[in-house]
Amino acid sequence: MQNIDRTSAEPYYLQLARIIEGQIKTGKYRVGDRVPGETELCRSFDLARSTVRETLRALEQQRLIRIVPRRGAFVADPAENRWKLQVTQGFLETGAHSPDRSIETSVLRAEFEVLPDFAADALGLPKGENGFAIERVRHIDGKAAMHSTNYLPADVGAILIGKPVLQGNASLNHTLAEAGFSIYAARREVAAIGAPPDTAKHLGLARGAPVLFVQSTSRSDVGRVFDFYRSFVRSDVVTISVDAEAPAEITHGASEAE
């Protein structure tokens, strides 16, 4: 086992982080394995608890480990908590989350209301039109990850009344699909912005802290926009995944040239 070099100018917490990172990369600890806890690390390396906590925080920021409250620190899978925006699915349906993750949804409000102008425009409805809004906060392993609001036409929103999705116990996409509103196409835009005051509060951030802002419009097979949402995402908790590939005609042409 490597030791802390107490004559080095490198901070102890970074030395320990490098040691644990090396153990992960060499396979001593594999994806899903629990790494030694604070008490064990303090004893093994003769370090203060505050130093060890700084080490674990640094490793978590590098996405090498994930810290689960009251359970400990575990080696992270690079694919975990990845929201793939190209698919016609929502955050909870992408299959990117490990089965042992605890994902919870808190519904802040779900009601009929006069749609904000930006939502009416996105849905192709007249300004001042009534619609339905559902505002939610998603937590992963106890950490606030996303604050989002979906806006729907009134007739689509009526489908949700009495359904488990309004208690945070079901997928909005699945609920709509079961009622005949499956996503045939979607347009999603991503920008980095400062968290608005209400979002900062819900996500446990300082006002103006950087978040990823995602807007999406979902269309049915007949071209109707039936869902528009705005989501604010903590990128230190959730990774936004965007893949790129060449169009089919380009790859086909390349194979013919060979």
Image (cartoon, rainbow, N blue to C red):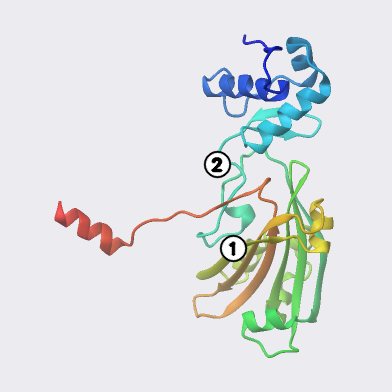
In this rendering, does residue 217 appear at all? yes
The answer to which of 18 and 137 lies nearer the viewer is 18
Circle 1 sits on which residue? 190
Whether residue 183 appears in this view of the structure is no
Vertical comparison of 90 with 68: above or below: below
**Left-right relation of 28 to 244:** right
Between residue 113 and residue 222, name the one nearer to us: 113
Q: Which mark is residue 135?
A: none
Residue 190 as seen in the image, left or right of residue 232: left
Q: Is residue 9 above or below residue 184?
A: above
Residue type at the position of mark 2: Ala
**Camera-nearest label, 1 or 2:** 1
Local secondary structure at mark 2? loop
Q: Which residue is mark 2?
A: 79
Q: Earlier in the sequence, mark 1 or mark 2?
A: 2
User: Mark 1: which secondary structure?
Assistant: strand
